[in-house]
Amino acid sequence: MRKTRLKKLLRKLKKLESSKNRMNFDSAKKITRNGVYIVYEGKKLLYIGSTSKDNHRRMGDLDGHFSNHTLHKKFLKKALKTKESFRSKIEIYQKKRICSEKRLGEIDQKIKGRIRKFSFNFLELRGREIKKFEHFAIGILNPDYND
């Protein structure tokens, strides 16, 4: 039973990783189905995420406000060279004084430009299967930006 389940998970992982499924950011951000996705920069696997809200364009959140997507926020923290947590732009430049508003805008635009060059793979899944498979894929593939 466990071997069969493991084989099924590995087949799904192979399908998710398949380069024939690779799409650019403009295509990926239009996806409104539920499932698991991989984010690549060139050939480097950066991040594995999931979307489980019907008709929600999760990957489109990537180049929006940093608070809408974990990966965007991680890029911002790295660029700001901080481990401090923050939820808003005002926290960054007024309350915590990590950087100026102008500098934050410049950094954020660079990050958004970088994100728009990423490529993605997506595997449609349903219900509880989504989170379980996402965690399995992260555990096996160990992307740089997943905790």
Image (spheres, grey):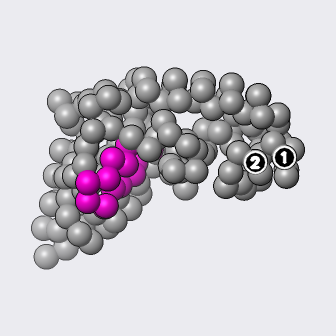
Task: Report the Cα–Cα distance between label 2 and label 1.
Answer: 5 Å
Q: What's the residue type where badge 2 is placed?
A: Ile
- Percent across and percent down for residue 75 are 61, 38
Q: Is residue 141 visible?
A: no
Q: What's the residue type where badge 1 is placed?
A: Gln
Q: Which residue is mark 2?
A: 90
Looking at the rendering, the stretch of residues picked out in magenta corresponds to: 47-59
- Percent across and percent down for residue 14 are 21, 45
Find numbered disc 1 in the image and state the secondary structure of the residue it sits on. helix
Q: Is residue 1 visible?
A: yes
State the image quarter where residue 61 is shown.
top left
Viewer-proximal residue among 95 and 9 = 95
Find numbered disc 2 in the image and state the secondary structure of the residue it sits on. helix
Vertical relation: 136 (above or below) 118: below
State the image quarter where residue 129 is shown.
bottom left
- Percent across and percent down for residue 65 are 55, 43
Viewer-proximal residue among 101 and 125 = 101
Left/right of residue 16 with respect to residue 78 in the rendered view: left
